[in-house]
Image: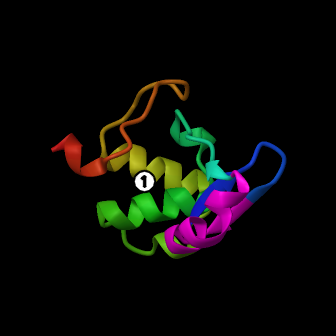
């Protein structure tokens, strides 16, 4: 599921639901976080899962941030832009 907004309301919907229902109502893809700290816990969990971090489903945001940064060797300041595709860091 992804986040979509019409400028006033924000919804979470599958891509199919967006294309069938919400696109014609003026919704567009929602925010795009620039740093790890700006990401929601659900987004961090998905990133951690994609990176192969075990037991990420039970981790809190601080734990997810630490694990992701350690794994990707991202010891940069919190305001440094992130690479959205973890696979491209190889």
Judge whether 75 appears above or below 53 on screen. above
SS at mark 1?
helix
Residue sticking out furthest to the front? 24
Drawn side of residue 4 relative to residue 53, left or right: right
Rendered residue at 59%/40% (across/down)? 37
Instruction: Tell me if 30 is positioned left or right of 57 in this view.
Output: right
Give the residue furthest to the left: 90
The image quarter containing residue 89 is top left
Q: Residue at x 53, y 58 (%)?
A: 43
The C terminus lies in which quarter of the figure? top left
Residue at 62% in and 42% down: 31
Q: Nearer the viewer, residue 20 or 28?
A: 20
At which x and y percent is residue 47? 42, 58
Name the quarter where the N terminus is drawn. Answer: bottom right
Visual colour scheme: rainbow
Q: Work out whether 55 lies above or below 19.
A: below
Residue underneath mark 1: 67
Magenta residue check for 87: no
In the image, the segment drawn in magenta is 11-26
Q: Main secondary structure of the magenta part?
A: helix
Q: Could you tell me residue 54's position as x and y percent? A: 37, 72
**Residue 36 locus on image (x, y percent):** 52, 41
Does residue 12 show up magenta in the picture?
yes
Q: Is residue 36 above or below residue 64?
A: above
**Are there few (<14), some (14-19), or many (20+) residues within 10 Å of tag 1?**
some
Mark count: 1
Identify the residue at horizontal 33%, vertical 64% (top origin): 50
Residue 20 placement (x, y as % from top left): 58, 72
């Amino acid at each position: 599921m992804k986040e979509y907004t019409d400028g006033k309301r924000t919804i979470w919907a599958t891509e199919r639901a967006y294309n069938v229902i919400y696109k014609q109502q003026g919704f567009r893809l929602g925010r795009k976080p620039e740093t790890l700290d700006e990401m929601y816990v659900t987004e961090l969990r998905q990133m951690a899962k994609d990176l192969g971090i075990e037991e990420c489903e039970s981790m809190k945001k601080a734990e997810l941030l630490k694990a992701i940064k350690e794994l990707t060797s991202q010891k940069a300041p919190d305001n440094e832009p992130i690479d959205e595709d973890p696979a491209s860091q190889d």
